[in-house]
Amino acid sequence: MATKEQQRQKKLAKKRSKELAKKKAAAREKNRMQSFSGQLSSAIEGSIERCLVAEDLLNSDSKFGTVFITRRMPDGRVAAVRFLIDGFCMGVKNCNAMFCFPSQLTELLENSPETMMAITPPAARRLVEQAAAYARQFDILPHPDYDKLTAIFGDIDPNECSTDFVFGRDGQPVYIAGPGENEQRIGEIIEKLSATAGEGNYIVEYDEAFDLDDEMAGTSWTDDPELDIDIDEDLPPAT
């Protein structure tokens, strides 16, 4: 009898241990989904919902606009990452992310100041990465969150797109200073172009309309500071 009771107690203990492990796993997942890095990591495992590019970005006269990619999250929401590209000089000028329900995303896109069109995921990644590489040759780095947010691409292979996107104008970088840039920032960019491209090998223009950041200010793209605290943690690099 003692042996049977011992066996029963062992089985109960094993069952309780499994239940406890499940509860701990569920708690860890809940905590993970409350952080920025956890939500983005979760989204990377999901399918791509939308992949869009602004028509103006592919227009040789403007070369400025958004590359936009979203993935489905396990809880039914979507993770959306937006790369703002200046194809004349600055590369990835801005990037940010948001987590929302599909209906909210649809509303945001409908109210966007840009006209968006579909693009293949490999082409989207190739465009973003080539834009960043173009600016880097002039010592102009992408937005500080670029390396973190490119994780959204996951295992998308940019080499599946054969297009080599053209940047600059007539073989030269064209720095178009927008209204959000002060004199110090403008001076820094001009110094970098002088040092890398050389005098006479770049163009500087001023255009108050050349800025989408003001259009997006105050929208849901403004990240919650509490979600940004651990943006550097546990994010797998884009491969």
Image: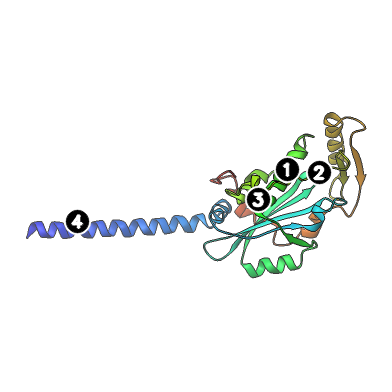
Q: In the rendering, which numbered label is found on residue 167?
A: 2
User: Given this view, does label 1 or label 3 mark the residue nearer the observer?
Assistant: 3
Please state which amino acid type lies under the numbered disc 4. Lys
CA gap between label 3 and label 2 equals 18 Å
Sequence-first tag of 1 and 3: 3
- Whether tag 2 and tag 1 are in contact, CB under 8 A, the answer is yes
Mark 4 touches mark 3? (CB < 8 Å) = no
Which numbered tag is attached to residue 130? 1
Q: Amino acid at mark 3?
A: Pro
Q: Nearer the viewer, mark 4 or mark 1?
A: 1
In the rendering, at what x and y percent does residue 145 appear?
67, 46
Seen from the viewer's position, the closer of residues 185 and 167 is 167
Measure the C-alpha gap from mark 1 to mark 3.
Answer: 12 Å
Q: Is residue 150 above or below residue 198?
A: below
Mark nearer the viewer, 2 or 4: 2
Inspect the image, locate mark 2, and give the three-letter code of the amino acid beneath it.
Answer: Phe
Which residue does the numbered mark 3 point to in the structure image? 122
Per the image, the residue denoted by label 4 is 10
Res 212 → quadrant? bottom right
Dot 4 falls on a residue whose secondary structure is: helix
Left or right, residue 20 beside residue 225: left
Residue closest to the far front = 162
